[in-house]
Image (spheres, helix red, strand yellow):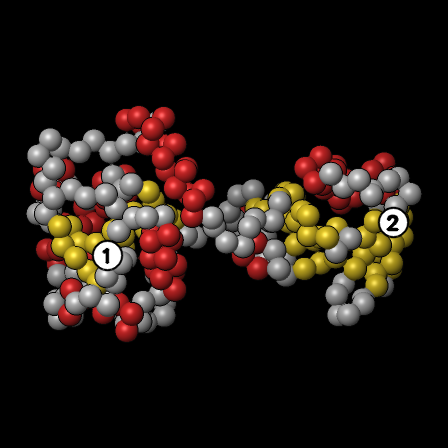
Amino acid sequence: MPLDMGGETVTEIIPEDRTVFALGTTERVLNSSCPFCKIVATAVRHIKKTRHWVDRNVDTPLSIRWSHNGPGYKGVFTLDDYEYAYICFVAERRMDLSTENLIQSSACVIDPTASHLVASEVVRWIADCENTHGAVCNADTSTTGLIKDSYRGLKLMRFVDVHQKCIVERTEVVRYVALSYVWGAAPTFRLTKMNQPRTRIPGVLSGLRVPQTVWDAIALTRACGEQYLWVDSLCIVQNDVEDLDAGTRVMDLICKSAGSYMQTP
């Protein structure tokens, strides 16, 4: 199917069930007044600057491919089948009732991230923060080191012991990691009055329906050399009104005072 890109015709080719758009030479794209070509030109310059794309010259044909394998499996464009950079579109602001038909977006070019976190890098980031950021990032704990003196309304705190894979209770302040995440609609295990005694048994979490997000957080916490992970659904008794109220009231302190804080979309 022919496409009109700023008055210049390009051809859509579909090899191997992938949609590829031939844009002509690199020189044509870099000098084009077409808004989309300007976005592609930005990506070309970005790749040249950050990835040393030395085989690219003015006469080299340039094409883009639509892919669903962008960050978060979102739709993106890639250049010449090389996923050196993604071209994607992001909303500038949310729509409201008065502008429900108005969608404003801008283009951005981003580098692919590594598929796995390097735990040693995370440990280094945390250490740098603790050693150089001072009171700005480091929690102010009480001189007694008791939970009740540092977290208003709490006598104790529960944590996932990532080594024993069970829930433990502590009355003294300990170093921990906090996780913030979206629960989702799928049925998963949550701490209740009835199952609370069982959760203290070492290894018990391995046999329970714990979300993969939480398992990933447990694995990362262990890899970083930490022992305790705070997760709201597992560390607050969800059907105990008093415990639930006390925990949610100090959730800001819990996240602020964590040795490190993990957040998922």
Front residue of this view, candidates 20 and 99 = 20
Label 2 crowd bin: few (<14), some (14–19), many (20+), radius 10 Å: some
Q: Is residue 244 visible?
A: no
What's the residue type where badge 1 is placed? Asp
What's the residue type where badge 2 is placed? Pro
Label 2, secondary structure: give it: strand
Q: Residue at x 43, y 44 (%)?
A: 120
Q: Is residue 150 left or right of residue 117?
A: left
Mark nearer the N terminus (1 vs 2): 2
Label 1 crowd bin: few (<14), some (14–19), many (20+), radius 10 Å: many
On the image, which quarter does residue 147 sit in? top left
Q: CA distance from mark 1 to mark 2?
A: 56 Å
Q: Is residue 2 visible?
A: yes
Q: Is residue 214 above or below residue 260?
A: below
Front residue of this view, candidates 262 and 31 = 262
Q: Position of residue 151 (x, y in %)?
A: 15, 41
Q: Residue furthest bottom?
A: 207
Q: Quadrant of the N terminus?
A: bottom right
Residue picked out by circle 1: 161
Q: Residue at x 20, y 31 (%)?
A: 140
Residue picked out by circle 2: 61
Front residue of this view, candidates 68 and 49 = 49
Q: Position of residue 222 (x, y in %)?
A: 33, 53
Q: Residue at x 37, y 32 (%)?
A: 129
Q: Position of residue 199 (x, y in %)?
A: 18, 66
